[in-house]
């Protein structure tokens, strides 16, 4: 730098504070500055609101639900069904199993005593509870338990455990379900949040408040069309069903973001210990029940004609994981015997062809898995 | 790091304690710099290399312009190339590559697009624009370059506004960095309401309404009414989300003695498109005005056509700034067209309605235009949107009607909440006890209505 320009620079540098806008931070113009007594008043109001909800529940997640013996998915009715039929094999899953396999026809084909336990929309939390609180608690435990799943459901423990699904969870749950609470509800939160959820009554009431608001808004809207809340809930599920949502319309950026998020969620090795899978395997082992997993084919698997890379990778890991534990996994997602003609709404099989075909595809597998047990 | 995470809470408490225990400005700034890099590199540490690169280039470009005045243009050029080049590479490469390939394929060449597929570094559009304003201002002789590298690096990376603005000007922020900040309880007093309001908007309004917005815009074929309901919900969501970020950023900055620019001024009360841009994302729109629109001639150009081109370039690029997709570009062009039309009709610039009746009607008309704009902005792709209007099924079946009504009810509910928040924000009442009660309730509402799991702020993707 020449001497002249250096002097010029220093001169300008000294003068810059005069030119630049100087801000007095402590005099910022915020309209509602309030001093200590007002801060205390705010805190006081907040504490008062909290006081209204004391004392805290003993358990962080409240699984109390009105007992209804007519509820066909209660432990009572499920146990009754198992104990009366004394099945050798139980198939467990969601509506894709319920609409995909015919119990009577399967029994006819396999000459075995198999029953199907399904709950539409259920996922691993419910399957875990069904095994822990129903199947293993009956006097006639099955020899073989086949769990039907799709995609990466097995390692998403918090999938479908809230909202309307929570009722189904609570029906099967005991009052104290530490594993369920940890894995389904507190898995993704830190210790402080866990503490808050455990002992802070206002925090515990969250779901109740949200549900009330939700119910009010949905019922008010439904009333305009002379419908009720339950109808509105079903309609929302039906309008926004997976089959009505289009993945392909995502922009490149969105796809990238989606991929990143999904990868994080489904990384098998990191998520396995947080899922219910190890618990399900352990429970089955303790009760001498052989496990088998079946991955069902979705309509989208046919329409897309290719599976996302992360799912392919996930399945490889899952297969490896189960193999080391002596558990078979059957993947039907690429099975060419199942075509669009076998499906009705969404990912469900149709009654005319789908359920028959899938039951027939499944029967030799059930047979061979059961035969292995007698060897 | 996300403002709505527990990590941020710990981060803020630790930094706040260390910062105010620091004996001098130098240590304060060093702390801020380290904290800002930790904040930015929390999930992807390699992001820090980009911001460091941008900092180094602009620091030396600024000094170079003064040291070698006859090569000012060269230094400005190097700053522009480095910053815009980085932006172009990370944000637009795939988009242009895809579109050029489509064009060539239409000409008969069977090519596959070459995509880099790199994750877009969060906030890159914000800090590149911020540092560009520094070098452009030096070039224009409006600002002296800074010799203190740490001060400058803090200006580029100051964590509260790093990933989603407001885009600060060097003239405003650097002087604040260059003075010693002294602790005062009034800092907490002025920061707390902003942070509470921000969390209220983000966690209670934006995150809750986003559930339906996301679903509507992923439907294969929603009815027009459902699309309108979804867009109205998005209108609430994007404002609540983005202004929440600014509020939390401003509140967090205040805790450390900084005063950041206000980024929103009740945008849905705009009476014209020009007025809207004076109220929406103010730090960005003034950036575009000062460094692009005025540089191109602004409203002083001679012909109407030239004026339209200036608007098209300024607002079209504003659209592109938001993301590498056609819907953002079309959104920018749409705004250019309405600004131009309003201007030609005599409602441009600083036009204001003369009476309450015309104020109500002009706000209503502008609101409709704004919502239509958000429809373009939020659409997953233009074909999807055109298809809905082409098939024109207004109400759809009874199921769609019911879902539309439910979403509209949510919109009404959250609009009322937003109005209450605004009422407090802009109130001139001196009943401080009333505001204290409000903030006490607000904290309770935040804890109750916060959804499990953090959702990113919308503007992170830009």
Image (cartoon, rainbow, N blue to C red):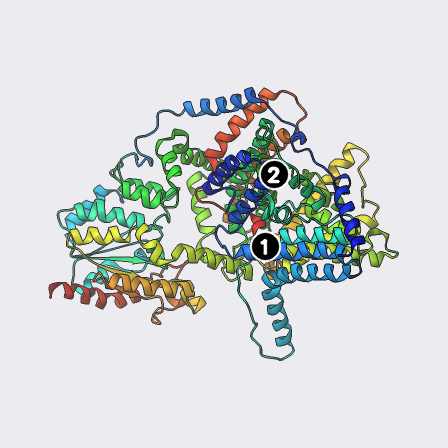
The image position of residue A180, as x and y in percent, is 30, 43
Does B286 sit left or right of B193 as displayed?
right
The image position of residue A98, as x and y in percent, is 30, 55
Residue located at (62% from left, 26% from top): A33
Q: Compared with residue A221, is residue A276 higher up or lower down, i.e. above or below?
A: below
What is the residue that sits farthest to the left in this orientation? A375
The image position of residue B3, as x and y in percent, is 52, 42
The image position of residue A156, as x and y in percent, is 36, 52
Nearer the observer, disc 1 or disc 2? Answer: 2
Frontmost residue, B266 versus B414: B266
- Which residue is disc 2 drawn over? B25
Frontmost residue, A199 versus B362: A199
- Secondary structure at numbered mark 2: helix
Say which label, 1 or 2, has the lower sequence index.
2
**Which chain does the residue under circle 2 lie in?**
B
- Which residue is disc 1 drawn over? B51
Residue A180 — which label? none
Q: Are marks 1 and 2 on the same chain?
A: yes
Q: Residues within 10 Å of mark 1 (few under 14, many from 20)?
A: many
């Amino acid at each position: 730098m020449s001497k002249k320009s250096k002097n010029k620079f220093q001169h300008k540098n000294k003068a810059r504070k005069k030119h630049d806008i100087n801000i007095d931070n402590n005099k910022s113009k915020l309209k509602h500055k309030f001093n200590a007594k007002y801060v205390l008043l705010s805190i006081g109001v907040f504490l008062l609101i909290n006081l209204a909800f004391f004392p805290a529940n003993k358990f962080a997640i409240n699984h109390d639900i009105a007992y209804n013996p007519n509820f066909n998915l209660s432990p009572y009715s499920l146990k009754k069904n198992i104990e009366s039929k004394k099945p050798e094999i139980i198939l467990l899953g969601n509506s894709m199993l319920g609409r995909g396999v015919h119990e009577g026809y399967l029994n006819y084909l396999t000459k075995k005593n198999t029953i199907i336990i399904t709950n539409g929309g259920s996922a691993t939390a419910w399957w875990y509870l069904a095994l822990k609180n129903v199947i293993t608690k009956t006097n006639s435990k099955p020899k073989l338990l086949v769990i039907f799943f799709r995609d990466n459901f097995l390692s998403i423990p918090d999938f479908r455990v809230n909202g309307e699904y929570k009722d189904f969870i609570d029906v099967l749950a005991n009052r104290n379900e530490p594993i369920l609470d940890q894995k389904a509800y507190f898995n993704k939160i830190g210790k402080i949040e866990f503490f808050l959820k455990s002992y802070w009554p206002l925090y515990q009431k969250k779901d109740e408040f949200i549900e009330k608001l939700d119910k009010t808004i949905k019922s008010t809207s439904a009333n305009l069309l002379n419908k009720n809340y339950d109808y509105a809930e079903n309609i929302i599920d039906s309008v926004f069903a997976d089959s009505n949502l289009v993945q392909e319309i995502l922009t490149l950026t969105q796809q990238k973001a989606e991929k990143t998020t999904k990868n994080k969620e489904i990384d098998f090795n990191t998520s396995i210990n947080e899922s219910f899978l190890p618990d399900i395997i352990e429970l089955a082992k303790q009760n001498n029940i052989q496990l088998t997993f079946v991955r069902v084919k979705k309509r989208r698997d046919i329409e897309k004609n290719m599976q996302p890379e992360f799912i392919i990778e996930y399945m490889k890991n899952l297969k490896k994981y189960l193999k080391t534990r002596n558990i078979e996994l059957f993947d039907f997602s690429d099975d060419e015997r199942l075509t669009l003609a076998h499906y009705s709404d969404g990912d469900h099989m149709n009654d005319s062809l789908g359920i028959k075909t899938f039951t027939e595809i499944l029967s030799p597998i059930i047979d061979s898995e059961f035969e292995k047990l007698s060897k | 790091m996300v403002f709505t995470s527990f990590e941020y809470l710990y981060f803020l408490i630790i930094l706040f304690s260390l910062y105010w225990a620091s004996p001098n400005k130098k240590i304060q700034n060093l702390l801020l710099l380290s904290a800002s890099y930790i904040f930015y590199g929390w999930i992807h540490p390699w992001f820090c290399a980009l911001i460091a690169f941008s900092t180094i280039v602009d620091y030396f470009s600024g000094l170079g312009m003064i040291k070698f005045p006859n090569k000012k243009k060269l230094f400005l050029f190097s700053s522009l190339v480095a910053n815009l080049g980085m932006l172009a590479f990370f944000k637009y490469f795939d988009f242009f590559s895809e579109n050029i390939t489509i064009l060539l394929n239409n000409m008969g060449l069977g090519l596959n697009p070459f995509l880099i597929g790199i994750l877009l570094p969060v906030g890159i559009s914000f800090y590149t624009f911020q540092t560009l304003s520094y070098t452009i201002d030096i070039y224009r002789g409006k600002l002296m370059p800074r010799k203190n590298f740490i001060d400058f690096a803090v200006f580029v990376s100051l964590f509260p506004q790093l990933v989603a603005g407001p885009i600060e000007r060097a003239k405003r922020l650097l002087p604040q960095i260059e003075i010693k900040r002294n602790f005062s309880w009034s800092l907490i007093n002025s920061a707390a309401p902003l942070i509470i309001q921000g969390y209220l908007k983000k966690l209670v309004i934006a995150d809750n309404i986003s559930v339906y917005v996301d679903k509507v815009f992923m439907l294969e074929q929603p009815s027009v009414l459902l699309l309108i309901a979804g867009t109205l919900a998005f209108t609430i969501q994007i404002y609540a989300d983005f202004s929440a970020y600014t509020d939390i950023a401003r509140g967090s900055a205040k805790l450390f003695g900084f005063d950041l620019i206000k980024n929103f001024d009740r945008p849905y009360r705009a009476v014209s498109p020009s007025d809207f841009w004076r109220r929406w994302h103010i730090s960005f729109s003034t950036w575009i005005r000062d460094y692009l629109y005025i540089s191109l001639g602004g409203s002083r150009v001679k012909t109407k056509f030239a004026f339209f081109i200036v608007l098209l370039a300024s607002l079209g690029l504003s659209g592109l700034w938001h993301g590498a997709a056609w819907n953002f570009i079309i959104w920018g062009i749409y705004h250019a067209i309405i600004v131009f039309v309003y201007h030609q009709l005599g409602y441009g610039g600083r036009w204001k309605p003369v009476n309450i009746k015309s104020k109500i009607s002009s706000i209503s008309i502008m609101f409709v235009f704004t919502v239509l704009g958000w429809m373009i902005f939020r659409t997953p792709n233009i074909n999807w949107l055109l298809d809905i209007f082409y098939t024109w099924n207004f109400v759809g079946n009874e199921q769609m009607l019911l879902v539309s009504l439910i979403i509209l009810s949510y919109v009404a509910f959250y609009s009322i909440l937003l109005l209450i928040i605004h009422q407090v924000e802009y109130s001139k009442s001196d009943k401080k006890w009333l505001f204290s009660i409000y903030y006490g309730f607000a904290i309770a509402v935040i804890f109750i209505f916060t959804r499990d799991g953090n959702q990113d702020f919308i503007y992170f993707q830009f």
